[in-house]
Each structure stands twice: as C-alpha cells, then as structure tokens.
Amino acid sequence: MLKVVSPTADRTGEATWVPLNTAAAALDSDAEATRVGATGYGRPEDVEIFTSTGNGGQTLYVSITSESRVLGVDLREPQGGRDHATAFVYDYVRAGVNAPADFFSPDNLALDKAGDLYIAEDPSVNSVGADIWVATGGNGGQHQPASSTVRFASLPDCAAEPTGIYFDKRGWGLFVHVQHRGGPDPRDLAVKIERVEYP
C-alpha cells in the first residue's frame, strides 16, 4: 500500500510502499491498510502507467473519483534498483486548480502516443451529461501538474456514462463505450473517435 510520509499538501509528497499481511488483507483489506498506516483516497478507479522516453522513468496516474482529481505517482527507482521502495505523489489534474470547476468524478483513463491523458467522467448524480477531458504535459518539470486540462468530448444524454476508454495500437483512435443510455434507444454503444491527419 502507498503511504505518504512527508506530506506537502493534501495527501501528496514523499511516499513509501508498505506491505500488507496477505491473510489479513484477504479478510478485510481496508482494516489491514489502516493497520499499516496506508494513505487513503476517495474511490480510486483506474490507473495508467506512462514511461518517459527521456529517462525511462515511470509515472502511475490514478483517478480519484470522489475527490475530482487525478494523482501522479512517480515510480522512481534508484539506479539499478528494483524494489520500488519509494514514490512521490502529486496532483496531476484537480478541479479548480488546473481543471475547470465542472471537471467532476474522473473515472477511466487512457494515454495516447504523445503522452496526453484522456479522462472519462462518472458522475454519480448526472444532471448535465458526462465529459471526456484531455490533460496535456507537465508544467515544465518533474512532479508538476498538467499544463492544460480541456474538454475533449461530451455526452448530452444525462443518463449515459463514457467508460472503458482506450486507444488503438497506433495511439490515435480512441474507443469509447457508452453505458446507461436513456431516451428511446437505451442500448449500450461503442464508438471510435478517429484523429484525422491533414497534409
């Protein structure tokens, strides 16, 4: 489990990974996480791992649905190490910080080939529809929030939820599954949003 040991803000900062007793975790993982002092977050839903082409370092993105934020977790590794003993946690996207106030309930995540992070919403109370957002680039350094978080697509059907987003092998075609549709045709739907390159 992840445990923030030197907080810089709201459960972000220097962290370590602490082991759980597997037998105890099988019975009640929440109680075992509390026992070892793990850091709690509100409804972590999906993860994506980004590997830097510059230094090979890896960042784990985690959507924290009930807190309207996406964490970045630097999975740093000392030179030649393999134990993943430490990490650094920071806000990559957060409503009202580097995302509009209507960025709400981030759920599924997908990375395109440029390293941009696509974020599908799953609002539990949906009166305005759900969106897919895209967060681009850090603000010029390590452990920095996305420089931009913008609305990429919207579902005007207030009952519907975009889910299961992922990119094709080329990294430009985004598949979106739409569930809980309302209206005269309530069947679930799968669509592909294709990026078109112009000469």
Image: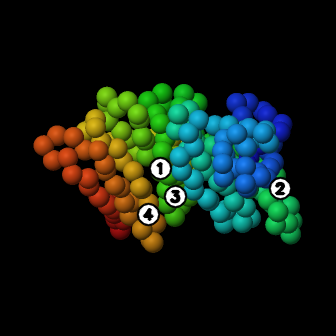
* Rendered residue at 34%/55% (across/down): 177
Marks 1 & 2, CB-CB < 8 Å contact: no
| SS for callout 3 | strand
Residue 86 in sight in this render: yes
Residue 163: mark: none
Is 125 left, or right, of 87 in this rendering?
left
Question: Dot 1: within a 10 Å radius of its alpha carbon, few (fewer than 14), some, or many (20 or more) residues?
Answer: many
Is 49 left, or right, of 190 in this rendering?
right
- Which numbered disc, 3 or 4, marks the residue that appears first in the sequence? 3
Tell me the distance, in whole angstroms, between the alpha carbons under discs 2 and 3.
Answer: 25 Å
Relative to residue 160, is residue 55 depicted above or below?
A: below
- Which numbered disc, 1 or 4, marks the residue that appears first in the sequence? 1
Q: Position of residue 194 (x, y in %)?
A: 33, 62
> Which residue does the numbered mark 1 point to in the structure image?
108
Tell me the distance, in whole angstroms, between the alpha carbons under discs 1 and 4.
Answer: 12 Å
Relative to residue 79, is residue 183 depicted above or below?
A: above
Is 173 left, or right, of 25 in this rendering?
left
Which amino acid lies under the numbered mark 2 shown in the image of this protein?
Answer: Ala
Looking at the rendered image, the quarter that the C terminus falls into is bottom left
Closer to the eye: label 1 or 3: 1
- Which numbered disc, 1 or 2, marks the residue that appears first in the sequence? 2
Give the residue furthest to the bottom: 169
- Which numbered disc, 2 or 4, marks the residue that appears first in the sequence? 2
| SS for callout 1 | strand
Tell me the distance, in whole angstroms, between the alpha carbons under discs 3 and 4.
Answer: 7 Å
Using the image as rendered, state which of residue 41 and residue 19 is in the foreground. Answer: 19
> Which residue does the numbered mark 3 point to in the structure image?
111
Tell me the distance, in whole angstroms, between the alpha carbons under discs 2 and 4.
Answer: 31 Å
> Which residue does the numbered mark 2 point to in the structure image?
85
> Which residue does the numbered mark 4 point to in the structure image?
167
Which amino acid lies under the numbered mark 4 shown in the image of this protein?
Answer: Phe
Which amino acid lies under the numbered mark 1 shown in the image of this protein?
Answer: Asn
